[in-house]
Image (cartoon, rainbow, N blue to C red):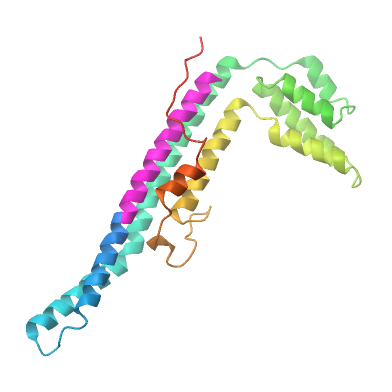
Amino acid sequence: MIEMVNSYNRAATRLDAAMKAARKEHMEIVKKFEAAKRDMLATERYPDWDFSARAKKEAAKAAFLAEKSGIRGRVEKVWETFDSTVRRVREELVAELDKIDIRRAAGVDAAAVTLLNSGTMRGKDFQQMATDFSENPAMLGLVRQAAQKAIEGLGEEQYQERHELLAVIENARTDAEKLIASFDNLNSIAKQFSGRRENGDWNSSDGYLSSNSLEFWEEATAGLVSTESKESEE
């Protein structure tokens, strides 16, 4: 598990760095836009009869319009690059965790499979089996499949049993799957932080003009990003 956590920490730290770099570039683009807007507004009082003043006024307006027409595309390019980086980091994390899982994987337990297929197990039995095979990716997959099949055979009034089985399906995950889910959660927070929805769209028509503070990011990701590595497993 320690080796897996170290792999996750490296990936999370890379996402953290990429997010902060993207936000910095995003804010620099916005600041340039805002400066052009201020310059334009400052020249509005210039008299049109003064050729030199009118030329400055027109130049400031042209500069602002140029910034305005291109700002959204430039900001979106920044976050497209971030998304591409995160996809690559995630792929590398999955590959690393898969290698570790293969080394740790135990075989399928025939007796447990027979019990899973017996139709006699209840929610608490599935939960116990998931705990017993928490380090066995193959068996956990079979436990989830059997729990899903058991749910399909429940009556509408069996609320408690359904709740317990749903908990098994949700929680019977390998260490690798849990760490990948944490990474995906971190990426979801990054999208919210950038002002985007889960699908990448902006939260509002001018959402690309703002971004949450770094303090918000640090608070929202507390416990998900760690630069500390543990000692490697023997």
Q: State yes or no: residue 14 in magenta.
A: yes
Find residue 230 and report its horizontal and vertical position in percent.
47, 19
Q: Report the predominant secondary structure element of the magenta stretch.
A: helix
Q: In screen coordinates, is 17 left or right of 226?
A: left
Name the residue at 42% across, 34% down: 13
Name the residue at 16% across, 75% down: 59
Find residue 201 and report its horizontal and vertical position in percent.
48, 59
Name the residue at 80% across, 36% down: 165
Q: In screen coordinates, is 98 left or right of 56?
A: right
Front one among 129 and 212: 212
Outermost top residue: 234
Q: State yes or no: residue 104 in magenta.
A: no
Name the residue at 40% across, 61% down: 208
**Where is the N terminus found, in terms of image quarters?**
top right
The quadrant in which residue 43 appears is bottom left
Q: In screen coordinates, is 23 left or right of 164?
A: left
Find residue 7 and report its horizontal and vertical position in percent.
47, 26
Span colored in magenta:
1-27
Front one among 146 and 208: 208
Q: State whether residue 204 is above or below residue 77.
A: below
Q: State whether residue 144 is above or below residue 189.
A: above
Front one among 233 and 142: 233
Q: Is residue 137 visible?
A: yes
Q: State whether residue 107 is above or below residue 121.
A: above
Find residue 117 and report its horizontal and vertical position in percent.
84, 26
